[in-house]
């Protein structure tokens, strides 16, 4: 028989996950007088696959199927993978939005720089002065 902590280490799960499995009826265990659980290894490995000792220390998901009270086969790995895919999808959407806004900013900057480079201002020497009273009085070299 295994304690909750020993069982958690054997299958690479948290004690909370095993406690939830016990409370939901997926995993059978004996509750001792002190409130702790005693879990039969065969019952534990019926629900969860053991962790590969070579990869100890890393959280490794193994294919773990069980039959819930309604008789449907459920796969914990699929739930984990779905959550991982959703997380990756959300990350990719955010990165795509960031890239799009960056592209739009760069396009505006390119347009602005192009306008600056192609803008042809008229040199002051080519500006013809108007024949005004002010120019006649104060300008010496008026044509």
Image (cartoon, rainbow, N blue to C red):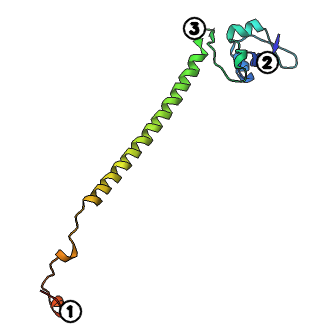
Residue 141 is left or right of residue 38, and the answer is: left
Residue 70 is left or right of residue 3, and the answer is: left
Most foreground residue, 91 or 83: 91
Quarter placement of the C terminus: bottom left
Residue at 20 percent of width and 92 percent of height: 138
**Vertical arrangement, residue 123 with respect to residue 91, above or below:** below
What is the CA distance from the residue labelled 3 to the residue labelled 2?
Answer: 26 Å
Badge 1 element = helix
- Give the mark, 3 or 2, whose residue is nearer the N terminus: 2
Most foreground residue, 109 or 75: 109
Residue 11 is left or right of residue 71, and the answer is: right
| Residue under pointer 3 | 72
Q: Position of residue 21 (x, y in %)?
A: 69, 16
| Residue under pointer 2 | 4
Q: Nearer the viewer, mark 3 or mark 1?
A: 1
What is the CA distance from the residue labelled 1 to the residue labelled 2?
Answer: 101 Å
- Mark 2: few/some/many CA within 10 Å (<14, 14-19, 20+): some
Residue at 65 percent of width and 20 percent of height: 60
Q: Position of residue 126 (x, y in %)?
A: 17, 75
Badge 2 element = helix
**Vertical arrangement, residue 29 with respect to residue 142, above or below:** above
Residues marked 3 and 1 touching at CB (< 8 Å)? no
Q: Nearer the viewer, mark 3 or mark 2?
A: 2
Residue at 72 percent of width and 20 percent of height: 56
Badge 3 element = loop
| Residue under pointer 1 | 138
Residue 104 is left or right of residue 119, and the answer is: right
Q: Position of residue 39 (x, y in %)?
A: 79, 11
- Give the mark, 1 or 2, whose residue is nearer the N terminus: 2
């Amino acid at each position: 028989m295994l304690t909750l902590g020993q069982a958690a280490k054997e299958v690479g799960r948290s004690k909370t996950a095993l406690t939830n499995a016990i409370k939901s009826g997926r995993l059978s265990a004996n509750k001792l007088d002190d409130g702790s659980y005693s879990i039969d290894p065969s019952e534990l490995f019926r629900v969860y696959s053991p962790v590969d000792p070579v990869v100890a220390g890393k959280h490794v998901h193994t294919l773990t199927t069980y039959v819930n009270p309604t008789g449907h086969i459920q796969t914990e790995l699929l739930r984990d993978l779905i959550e991982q895919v959703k997380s990756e999808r959300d990350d990719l959407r955010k990165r795509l939005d960031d890239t799009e806004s960056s592209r739009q900013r760069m396009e505006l900057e390119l347009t602005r720089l192009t306008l600056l480079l192609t803008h042809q201002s008229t040199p002051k020497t080519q500006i013809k002065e108007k024949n005004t009273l002010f120019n006649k009085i104060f300008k010496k070299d008026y044509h």
